[in-house]
């Protein structure tokens, strides 16, 4: 029996993670879920949104499924998501974005993966007031982190039989920081000469993603660009309710989560689309070698979407979390 840490999360988190767990269980996967609490309510009770118990559970089990965690805007505690990624050294955030059958959106044939550096950049949280009215926010870029993410991206392309890696940057303006990033990705490329490589400035990349998204395969970038471009990419295939991700660290430690947040506007009303969380669970299953269970989950999700009979509100329908969860489980059985 494989033990997996489960963090239900804030807002819609408990709703979508309960749905994903039921769907995984319907495949017969032998998983014991160890549920631990993190997030905004925990922060009120414990003074920290990520108690040590959560970190210890993930370190022991090596694998986690996490619901979204609320981060206060402006003041309040620092992001629990950033804290988890940093404390567990989950340096690669992998976000596959693939056209799903039956989902009405502007593009067909999108099949790209955003690989976001997860440990540094403007997410270092180093900000200070220089004098009243002037704030300095530090963008930290290191050679070791850039080389590591560059190598990860090319290895991902090789493992998935893909032929092009695009490095996204703004080295025309941030000549030192993004210049170092590019220099490292070029070095990583030398170790994978069979894979095509190109560099694109981030603003041009945004334009090309909304005009010809099918031209991209693997896209590697620093933390902030990755945050923004992966939401943009989600929009290309139907929105945040559909996009999964994995945070991967050294030696196979990994935490899987939907790209979306805690959606306070619809929390507790049974309206959330559990597909993003369910596809994240499918990524988890594939990561631990349960490939037929992973394929069963993904296949069932695609079958429900393709039939178009049970459609959640974010995709223009009226179905709630429970209805689509039952429909996916029915496809598995
Ligand atoms: P959000 O992703 O929670 O919501 C954006 C919009 O998409 C909302 O209208 C929401 O209703 C909708 N939406 C999101 N997920 C959906 C789903 N599964 N089904 C149907 N509709 C869905 O982004 P927002 O509002 O910017 O952030 C809310 C909170 O979530 C913030 O505290 C933020 O820090 C946190 N957050 C956490 C993340 C994580 O834990 N990885 C990622 C992004 C945001």
Image (spheres, rainbow, N blue to C red):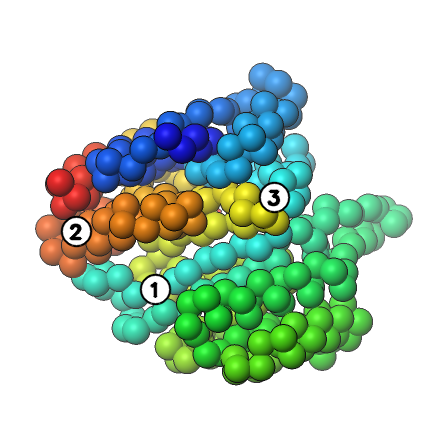
Residue 119 on image: x %, y %: 66, 51
Q: Is residue 50 left or right of residue 128?
A: left
SS under mark 2: helix
Q: Which residue is mark 2?
A: 304
Say which mark, if any, is on residue 85.
3
Q: Is residue 82 visible?
A: no
Look at the image and tell me in which quarter the N terminus lies: top left
Give the residue at x 58% y 33%.
59
Say which mark, if any, is on residue 273.
none
Please tell me whether residue 66 is drawn above or below residue 297 in the rendered image.
above
Q: Is mark 2 within 8 Å of ligand 1?
A: no
Which is more N-terminal, label 2 or label 3? 3
Residue 133 on image: x %, y %: 81, 50
Along the line of sight, the residue nearer the viewer: 17 or 29: 29
User: How far, Cα to Cα, is label 1 from label 2?
Assistant: 16 Å
Give the residue at x 65% y 45%.
89
Which is more N-terminal, label 3 or label 1? 3
Whether pointer 3 and pointer 2 mark residues with C-beta atoms closer than 8 Å, the reply is no
When asked about the image quadrant of residue 107, the answer is bottom left
User: How far, Cα to Cα, is label 1 from label 3?
Assistant: 24 Å
Whether pointer 1 and pointer 2 mark residues with C-beta atoms closer than 8 Å, the reply is no
Q: Is residue 157 left or right of residue 134?
A: left
When asked about the image quadrant of residue 26, the answer is top left
Please tell me whether residue 326 is drawn above or below residue 226 in the rendered image.
above
Q: Which residue is mark 1?
A: 98
């Amino acid at each position: 029996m494989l033990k997996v840490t489960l963090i239900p999360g804030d807002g819609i988190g408990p709703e979508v993670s309960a749905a994903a767990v039921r769907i995984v269980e319907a495949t017969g996967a032998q998983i014991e879920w160890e549920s631990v609490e993190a997030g905004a309510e925990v922060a009120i009770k414990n003074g920290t949104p990520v108690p040590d118990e959560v970190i210890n559970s993930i370190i022991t089990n090596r694998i986690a499924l996490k619901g979204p965690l609320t981060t206060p805007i402006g003041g309040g505690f620092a992001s629990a998501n950033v804290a988890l990624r940093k404390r567990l050294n989950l340096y690669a955030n992998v976000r596959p974005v693939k056209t799903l059958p039956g989902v009405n959106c502007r593009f067909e044939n999108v099949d790209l993966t955003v690989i976001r550096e997860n440990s540094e950049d403007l997410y270092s949280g180093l900000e200070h007031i220089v004098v009243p009215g002037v704030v300095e926010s530090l963008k930290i870029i290191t050679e070791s982190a850039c080389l590591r993410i560059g190598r990860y991206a090319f290895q991902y392309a090789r493992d998935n039989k893909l032929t092009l890696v695009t490095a996204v940057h703004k080295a025309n303006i941030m000549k030192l920081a993004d210049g170092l990033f590019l220099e490292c990705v070029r070095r990583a490329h030398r170790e994978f000469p069979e894979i095509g490589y190109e560099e694109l400035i981030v603003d041009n990349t945004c334009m090309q993603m909304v005009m010809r998204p099918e031209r991209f395969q693997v896209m590697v970038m620093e933390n902030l660009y990755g945050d923004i471009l992966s939401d943009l990419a989600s929009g290309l295939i139907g929105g945040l309710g559909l996009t999964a991700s994995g945070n991967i660290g050294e030696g196979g430690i990994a935490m899987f989560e939907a790209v979306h947040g805690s959606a306070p506007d619809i929390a507790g009303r049974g309206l959330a689309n559990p597909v993003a969380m369910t596809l994240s669970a499918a990524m988890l299953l594939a990561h631990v070698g349960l490939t037929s269970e992973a394929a069963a989950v993904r296949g069932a999700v695609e079958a429900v979407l393709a039939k178009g009979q049970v459609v959640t509100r974010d995709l223009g329908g009226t179905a709630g979390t429970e209805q689509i969860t039952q429909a996916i489980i029915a496809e598995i059985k």
